Image (spheres, rainbow, N blue to C red):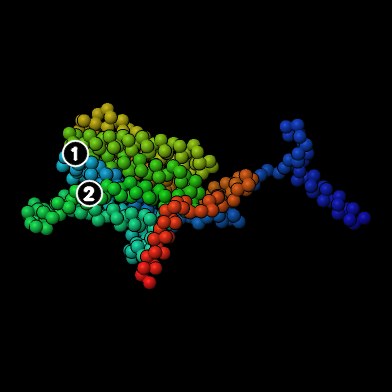
Amino acid sequence: MKERRSDAGAQDIHAQMFSRGRDGGGGREQLAVPRAEFRSYYGRAVLKTPVWEWKIAAYLFAGGLSGGSALLAAGADLTDRPTLRRVGRVGALASLIAGMYFLVADLGRPERFHHMLRVAKPSSPMSVGTWILSAYGPGAALAGAAELMPAPLRRSRPGRLLSWSARPAGLSAAAFAPGVASYTAVLLSQTAVPAWNAAHPYLPFVFTGSAAASGGGLGMLLAPVEEAGPARRLAVLGAGLEVAASRLLERRIGLAAQAYTSGTAHRLRRRAEYLTVGGALGAVVAGRRRPAAALSGLALLAGSVLQRFGVFEAGVESTRDPKYVVVPQRERLDAGRPARGDDRQRPQFPRLVAGVRTMRSAAARVLG
């Protein structure tokens, strides 16, 4: 009798939790209780909020501006636009110094950057980014120093040598400029932060377009309109790429898009889009008028700043709500995929990684 009562009690509990009904003509069991809403994990967030401060967002902008300015300066040098070349080289150097200051200030210990140079790991975006900066920095520094060199020093032998090396140095910096502009996006997208990780197919295009728009905006702001034609074209191209990639990001990354389309991140990025589009339109319509060119350049620079801070804020916000972690995991499990979302069993760039490993093994054998 006790067993029968126990069975009856279990059936009552089952009846309370489930109700039988017809769903599309079937007789499947349906939950009678609402699905759980993922607010926290026992009162705590699933992921830790990034410890980075606003300095990292400023570093993202400064690095992009430096890359865009170096690319613009190389083009101006090859097309004989001395003032635009000077603006680009000095802007690349100044923003590089500012970016390194923000990065070191947030890291707290300057030697951490030096320690990254002890290894070269192609599968690590941080390691690759460190080496890209190390290759980019000397060229940008030499080219910028040549523009800032006092007139008496230009007539000396070291001054003439520096002036002669400015073009090769500037071209070297321009060769690494796209990597400087985009590697930070790859670095963010390889973290566990949901909004950044989900946006990995689009974030590099957003950052590269933003870098080009800011570099062009700086040229429009400080160079005469007679020489600023390449700056206007670079700004329009970069603005178009940034806005298009940003819109695709919002539409195609699923649940994580809510972090970009709500709250502070949404407000920052919408203002960034208005400023970027306005600056690009000003460059096309009235870019040959000095006041309009300056205002358009300022708008493009401000839009680039807000874009980086908006992306940064979206990532931080996505770590505070567990739904950005739990819901995608359940969706992947329901689809028969790994919950972590990393279906790849091999490195992202297998041939590159295999080649580097082969060279490392050969070097180890030669060195004994």
- Please, which residue is most extreme toward the top here? 285
Judging depth in this view, the residue of 67 and 279 nearest the camera is: 67
Query: Where residue 146 sits in the image (x, y, percent)?
Result: 16, 52
Circle 1 Cα neighbour tier, 10 Å, few/some/many (<14 / 14–19 / ≥20): few
Amino acid on which the number 1 mark rests in the picture: Thr
Determine whether the residue tagged by mark 1 lies in a helix, strand or loop: loop
- The residue that disc 2 covers is 170
Quick one: quadrant of the C terminus? Answer: bottom left
Judging depth in this view, the residue of 164 and 327 nearest the camera is: 164
The dot on residue 79 is 1
Looking at the image, is 351 positioned above or below residue 225? below
Determine whether the residue tagged by mark 2 lies in a helix, strand or loop: helix
Residue drawn at x 42%, y 60% as measured from the top left: 358
Residue drawn at x 11%, y 55% as measured from the top left: 159
Query: Where residue 191 sits in the image (x, y, percent)?
Result: 47, 53
Quadrant in the rendering for residue 272: top left
Looking at the image, is 251 positioned above or below residue 131? above
Q: Is residue 328 left or right of residue 275?
A: right
Mark 2 vs mark 1, CA separation in Å: 13 Å
Going from N to C along the chain, the mark reached first, 2 or 1, is 1
Circle 2 Cα neighbour tier, 10 Å, few/some/many (<14 / 14–19 / ≥20): many
Quadrant in the rendering for residue 71: top left
Judge whether residue 92 can be spotted in this image. no
Do callouts 2 and 1 mark residues in contact (Cβ within 8 Å)?
no
Query: Where residue 319 sits in the image (x, y, percent)?
Result: 50, 51
Residue drawn at x 56%, y 52% as measured from the top left: 340
Q: Is residue 145 left or right of residue 317?
A: left
Quick one: quadrant of the N terminus? Answer: bottom right
Amino acid on which the number 2 mark rests in the picture: Gly
- Please, which residue is most extreme toward the bottom here? 368
